[in-house]
Image (tube, grey):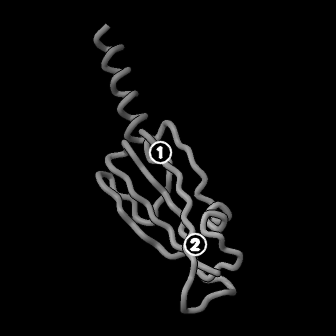
Amino acid sequence: MRKVVALAVAAALFAILGFGCAYAPPLPGTIYTDVKAGAGVGPAAATGNLKKGEACATSILGIVATGDASISAAKKAGGISSIAYVDYTSYAILGIFAKYCTVVYGR
């Protein structure tokens, strides 16, 4: 019976720690991640007053993930019709909580 319990605990830990990373940030950290990365430049690349739109998705324990972190959702949130550039941010703590955001700048 002890072997079965030990095996079940080991399998649960492996599932949580091994598969808990349900996202792929640019530089994942096992304990803590807080990373920003740039993605690309669109045809509206220019300086000046740009609008900003953000769309995020979150994950809890790598088991439940919700949200729309698409570029189109970020465009809509910021009222943007022409993209200047796109950034991404990712934040995670111990595989318990993770947040991935797409940030769009444009006009």
Which secondary structure, mark 2? strand
Query: 75 above or below 64?
Result: below
Q: Quadrant of the C terminus?
A: bottom right
Residue 7, how many percent across, how many down? 36, 21
Does residue 75 appear anywhere in the picture? yes
Query: 87 above or below 25?
Result: below
Q: Which residue is drawn at 52% across and 72% down?
A: 87
Q: Which residue is drawn at 37% across and 40% down?
A: 17
Does residue 19 appear anywhere in the picture? no
Q: Residue furthest bottom?
A: 47
The amino acid at mark 2 is Val
Front residue (pair 37, 74) = 74
Front residue (pair 90, 19) = 90
Residue 58, how many percent across, how many down? 49, 48
Q: In which quarter of the image is the N terminus?
A: top left
Q: Is residue 87 left or right of residue 27?
A: right
Q: Please tell me in which quadrant of the rendered image residue 97 appears.
A: top left
The mark found on residue 73 in the picture is: none
Discs 1/2, front: 2
Which is nearer the N-term, disc 1 or disc 2?
A: 1
Front residue (pair 81, 88) = 81
Q: Residue at x 32, y 52 (%)?
A: 30
Query: 80 above or below 24?
Result: below
Which secondary structure, mark 1? strand
Q: Circle 1 sits on which residue?
A: 59
The mark found on residue 104 in the picture is: 2
Dot 2 alpha-carbon crowd within 10 angstroms: few under 14, some 14 to 19, many 20 or more = many
The amino acid at mark 1 is Ser
